Amino acid sequence: SYVLTQPPSVSVAPGQTATLTCGGPNIGSKNVHWYQQKPGQAPVVVVYADSDRPPGIPERFSGANSGNTATLTINTVEAGDEADYHCQVWDTSSDHPGVFGGGTKLTVL
Amino acid sequence: QVQLVQSGGGMVQPGRSLRLSCAASGFSFSTYSMHWVRQAPGKGLEWLASISYDGGKTYYTESVRGRFTVSRDNSKNTLYLEMNSLRAADTAVYFCATPVEMATTYYFDYWGQGALVTVSS
């Protein structure tokens, strides 16, 4: 089955740029979605289909996907961005197609 | 507005059963597939199962196949997850979620509030 790999943690100072990665074999051929999850809450999609943002998500959040790595970039990080971030793909070749990465804890220093 | 209200979580002994419910409102429930996702304590999200809009097709991740059953009652706008032969490793918060279906992918735009299931003796 398809496996997505995320670093467990990333730390960044306020105002700086956070780069979160999601690795998988030839992930560039798939659509990658990113979720933000704060403690005790359900996930919220912040980027879908590699680089699109849902309404209400700040332009500071952007995504890219190529080769074996997808990336979520958060510009001008704010304290409120501290959360877990999960990547997700839909593996149409599998009979259990939903796949999430292990999640990355973003800490704002 | 779209709402998914979950019920049915709790503590259960290993080997026993539990049923989760997810009551939907604010959208045309009977025209959407529905999904279950869980999150073990301190862990990432795990996609568990899905059911087609009419209940005719179901899919499961390997770790729950044969033990869990997803079903729906479109007359009641409600999704269910019947969990049998529960194990300690099934301890998690369980979420129902509605998908956005694109050409070759799905993502999840609305989620229930989550239901904690604790499997312990």
Image (cartoon, coloured by chain):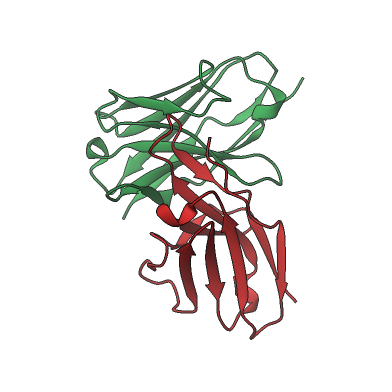
Chain colours: A red, B green
In this rendering, the answer to whether A2 lies above or below B54 is below
Q: Position of residue B45 (x, y in %)?
A: 58, 45
Between B83 and A67, which is closer to the camera in this rendering?
A67
Q: Residue at x 61, y 14 (%)?
A: B85
**The quarter of the displayed image where residue A59 is located:** bottom left
| Direction from residue A97 to residue A40 in the image, left or right | right
In this rendering, the answer to whether B79 lies above or below A82 is above
Q: Position of residue B113 (x, y in %)?
A: 51, 47
In this rendering, the answer to whether B22 lies above or below A76 is above
Q: Position of residue A26 (x, y in %)?
A: 49, 51
Q: Residue at x 51, y 29 (%)?
A: B61
The C terminus of chain B is located in which quarter? top right
Between B101 and B119, which is closer to the camera in this rendering?
B101
The N terminus of chain B is located in which quarter? bottom left
Can you see residue A31? no
Q: Residue at x 51, y 42 (%)?
A: A99
Q: Position of residue B4 (x, y in %)?
A: 40, 44
| Direction from residue A84 to residue B74 in the image, left or right | left
Can you see residue A1? yes
Q: For the image shown, how many numbered marks are present on the structure?
A: 0
| Direction from residue A48 to residue B92 in the image, left or right | right
